[in-house]
Image (cartoon, rainbow, N blue to C red):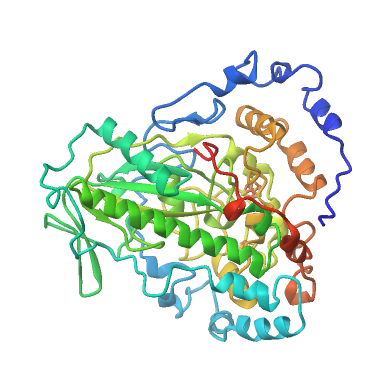
Amino acid sequence: MSNFHSTVSRREFMKAIGLAGAGIGGAALVSPVFHDLDEAMSADSLSHPGKPWWIKEREIENPTTEIDWNMFNRYPESQGARAAGVRGGYPGAVTAEEFAKVASNPGKVNAKAWMTANKPGYRLQDKVLASQNGLPPGASNPWVISSAIANFESYGVPKYQGTPEENSRMLRSVLKLYGASMLGYMELNEKTKKFVFEEYQFRDVPKGFSDAGIDVLPNVPLWGIGLGCPNSTANIATGPSQISYASTGLGHTMIEVTGSCTQRFLMGIGYQCMFGGYENCYPHPGIDTMVGMTELGRACNHGINPSAGIGFTPTSLTTDLPLESTNPIDAGILRFCDSCAKCADVCPNGAITHGEQSWEPQAGWSNRGHKQFQNHMLNCHIYRTTVGQCSTCEGACVFNKGTGAMVHEVVKATMSTTSMFNGFFRKMDDAFGYGPGDMGPGRDPTTGVFNNKAVEWWDKELPAWGYDLGKTYY
Ligand code: SF4
Ligand code: SF4
């Protein structure tokens, strides 16, 4: 049973933000003022259908993150903190000893010791839950599919043709059915091609292909597709643990299935689709933020979705089906992160900065040319390797509350409009005991403290995949 308790009643909370007894219209500081919830929720958009009014759309290629397009250039994926190719270190920032900590993989040692001792979140059943939720044995996600599939030619009809607007709507329905809860599109042009990792090559060929280990994009009009599915908040609240990892790992599986089905759909109607599995040619936070799935927040160099927070798993596709770019969003997330830093408070290894946004990365693990919270991504990677995955920041994010309770929608609407209550909302999030509770620096498995929510999780009655479906993630 959950031991959830709050020291603040719902009535006190609503009163504190000026809503008690007056309905949503009583939030005088929040504009626009709507007369009832139906009116508030009906402001629709072609770019992000179904999004609530308080998520504002910005101009194409103008997210809340500042970008200097002259400084911003393509980045090598091999420089990322998780990539095997960077074991040589980041000169001036990380020592050989710090790299050795990663190479020794203490996670294996810890896994056996904690399994043997039946530690919460690391027991045998916890470990197997996390390790057996991948694609079926033998399944693969190639960059392009070279084998024949049933398509317009085999059906004896012309390829599908539509306007970019029609195509965008059609593909949105396809992606939703196949499992994407959030999505958006980005035309590849001289600016946005800079999001494609350096390892991927553009060549003057009509179609994408793989050539001796190099994935090739054709120099024809192309569009990037960002897509994602939420992770179970009940799982990520158990972090650091294998129960948390089971949810994020399952997200990889589900979004790869979504990507693969969509890749084959696009081929079937007569278009190209380059995929390659969960990690492919774009850094997720970049494309997610450009297409309006997220704003780039503080935690872990990850995009923050207005409903799922950091708690979702993204991937991306590239197609030559003409699409309309979707708008970046402003839900007040970046402003909120300025004063929140809850993820930095709970990070067991000091990977997330408490500082302000900056143009200067701490080391080569982040690309230059945009202003962001500059985190120590190698510290994150070291810790995750030590305990066998982490995601404590993911569980803690103030934005991962979904849309299940009206109070969360009211809070988010207020956040999107004024930063006046941001400090208060952060305190309330702590008071309600959301996320991984008091896990954090000095209170984590490496210091002998385990999250008991990982034991309670097994007695919860959760929806399939651990999250509520619906038009709630935009
Ligand atoms: S170490 Fe854990 S809490 Fe810290 S940034 Fe990495 S995943 Fe998040
Ligand atoms: S926990 Fe707070 S600071 Fe961190 S990403 Fe979420 S909202 Fe931003």
The percent position of residue 14, horizontal first and vertical second, equals 80, 28
* Residue 143 left/right relative to 108: left
Does residue 127 appear anywhere in the picture? yes
Q: In what quadrant of the picture does the N terminus appear?
A: bottom right
* Residue 457 left/right relative to 146: right
Q: Is the residue 34 above or below the residue 170 in the image? A: above
Q: Is the residue 192 above or below the residue 42 in the image? A: below
Q: Is the residue 323 above or below the residue 150 in the image? A: above
Q: Is the residue 201 above or below the residue 433 in the image? A: below
Identity of the residue drawn at 30% across and 35% down: 324
* Residue 76 left/right relative to 409: left
The percent position of residue 408, horizontal first and vertical second, equals 69, 35
The percent position of residue 13, horizontal first and vertical second, equals 82, 32
In the figure, residue 344 lies in which quadrant?
A: bottom right
Identity of the residue drawn at 77% across and 37% down: 424
In the figure, residue 244 lies in which quadrant?
A: bottom right
The percent position of residue 167, horizontal first and vertical second, equals 27, 36
The outermost residue toward the right is 7
The outermost residue toward the front is 155
Identity of the residue drawn at 66% across and 28% down: 414
Please state which of residues 420 and 239 is positioned toward the viewer in this rendering.
239
In the figure, residue 459 lies in which quadrant?
A: bottom right
Does residue 353 appear anywhere in the picture? no
